[in-house]
Image (cartoon, rainbow, N blue to C red):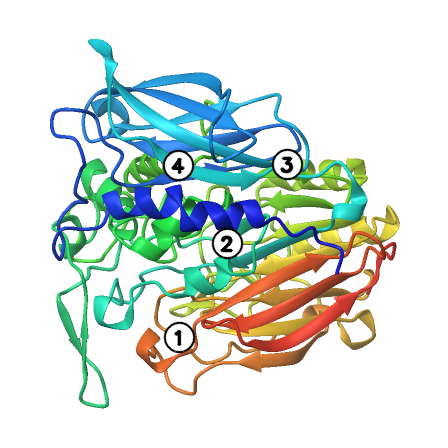
Amino acid sequence: MSHRPLPGRRSVLRGSLAASAALSLPTALGAAPAFARSGRPAAGWGVQAGDVTCDSGLVWVRSDRPARMIVETSATESFRNPRRWHGPLLGEGTDFTGTTRLRGLPSGEQIHYRVLLADPDDPRRTGEPVTGTFRTASAKRRDGVRFVWSGDLAGQGWGINPELGGYRIYDAMGALDPDFFLCSGDNIYADGPITQAVALPDGRTWRNITTEEKAKVAETLAEFRGNFRYNLLDENLRAFNARVPSIVQWDDHEVVNNWYPGEILTDTRYTEKNVDVLAARARRAFSEYFPISTLRRPDGRVYRVRHHGPLLDVFVLDMRTYRNANSPDDQPADPRGILGREQLEWLKRELSRSRAVWKVIASDMPIGLVVPDGTNIEAVAQGDPGKPLGRELQIAELLRFVKHRRITGTVWLTADVHHTSAQHYQPSKAAFTDFEPFWEFVSGPLNAGAFPASALDATFGPDRVFVKAPTTANVSPAGGYQFFGEVDIDGHSGELTVRLREQDGTVLFTQTLQPGRVGQ
């Protein structure tokens, strides 16, 4: 394997990162993290980096009070001769969160950074620095790329359980020393209250850390913000964020289960029934709690392409914002579909422009797996094995485009369905045949209920090569079935290897794909 070992990152974990993590441990169940210096701004929620490229990256922090964000970077963890970046003023308008863009960074290098929070009225008064590290994308193909992906965190009432070590899956992902983490959506469950204790079928009791904002469904901006803060109470997640940058997309549970624009809720738990109002609040909180490059734009769009050197482009989709209403999904014409026309045309344009060896399409929902919404359809496939209908029409258009434009190296990654599987789509087995074969890999959940395998729709000819899923619904993380995936691109051969892994890192399935092909 040609991926370059970087012991500097691990030494940081043993040193300054470990020290900064200790500053931000929760003082009690449900309590906010403890702070080191009374009267000075403190960053007890840790740091994050995101949307890292060959020469840039975003760094995020949250303060406990108004503060000026300052970031210092260095080639070494000693921070000798640091470079300083002056960030925004953090205040109530952003829930005391802020992001600073770092530009002009060296390619393919480990960047050590520390965040200082300064008193706005006295810049000499700063809190304890919080440190992190990330690796910029390499402009040299030979360095290779490794990343991990998954989704679905704190769902179905399964939150942070200290008796089980909290979100332990982040330790297993971090141990692989990935270049970045692709989170495929459902970063929170805003519609899923978390109680202190849940009875398990075997007689045991699951015990959650709880907070006021997680005691009910999220409706207000403060409640949505509290959902994002809840996950940051977990020490494993904070330590992971400090050493692995992220590429984040959203799905439904950042707002409410199976939502679509224009929906009016009938759920009696909600006093605010207009989903568009809830979605606007959720999007604002989402933009405040993740370092994402596009969310400062007026349209607040989540879809984007992240260029990770010559080997990889990641195309991040948004299957929530532009979709039509959930329905039986069997209409013969569907111009809006699940992506919206603007996003579909953007995706085709960017795929045709890409010169990367591999083009990962990060889809927040699967293509050929049937995901119902009552008697309606939530995802793309509706179970009719015939010609494309409804939302399948947009996917057919995209697959046809990839084939006729001879676009090589496309791979689909997703989460959402709370089990792990690998599907190979083949025109020889499909009702719609005007496409080249491709792979779709499914992972997750990170820490949520696990569910039986979804039914397949034969329209695009999926062959489920591998699956691991429980036979009963909503199996708790204590029962296993928590998954993540790893993608490793070899810098010499260009081969892309996917490994589907369990919570402890055990490899369940491996598939290696060859570069330079339109179909696999």
Assign the N terminus to one quadrant of the image.
Answer: bottom right
Label 1 crowd (10 A; few <14 / some 14-19 / many >=20)? many
Q: Is residue 385 left or right of residue 233?
A: right
- Residue 109: image tag: 3
Residue at 77% of width from left, 56% of height from top? 490
Q: CA distance from mark 3 to mark 1?
A: 38 Å
Per the image, label 3 sits on a secondary structure element best described as loop
Q: Which sits in the foreground, 150 or 28?
A: 28
Amino acid at dot 3: Glu
- Residue 131: image tag: 4
Q: Is residue 392 left or right of residue 452?
A: right
Residue 15: percent from left, percent from top: 40, 46
Q: CA distance from mark 4 to mark 1?
A: 34 Å
Could you tell which of marks 3 and 1 lies nearer the N-terminus?
3
Amino acid at dot 4: Thr
Amino acid at dot 2: Ser
Residue 54: percent from left, percent from top: 66, 33
- Residue 450: image tag: 1
State yes or no: discs 3 and 1 in contact (Cβ < 8 Å). no
Per the image, label 1 sits on a secondary structure element best described as loop
Mark 3 against mark 1, which lies toward the viewer? 3
State whether residue 299 is above or below residue 419. Answer: above
Q: CA distance from mark 4 to mark 2?
A: 26 Å
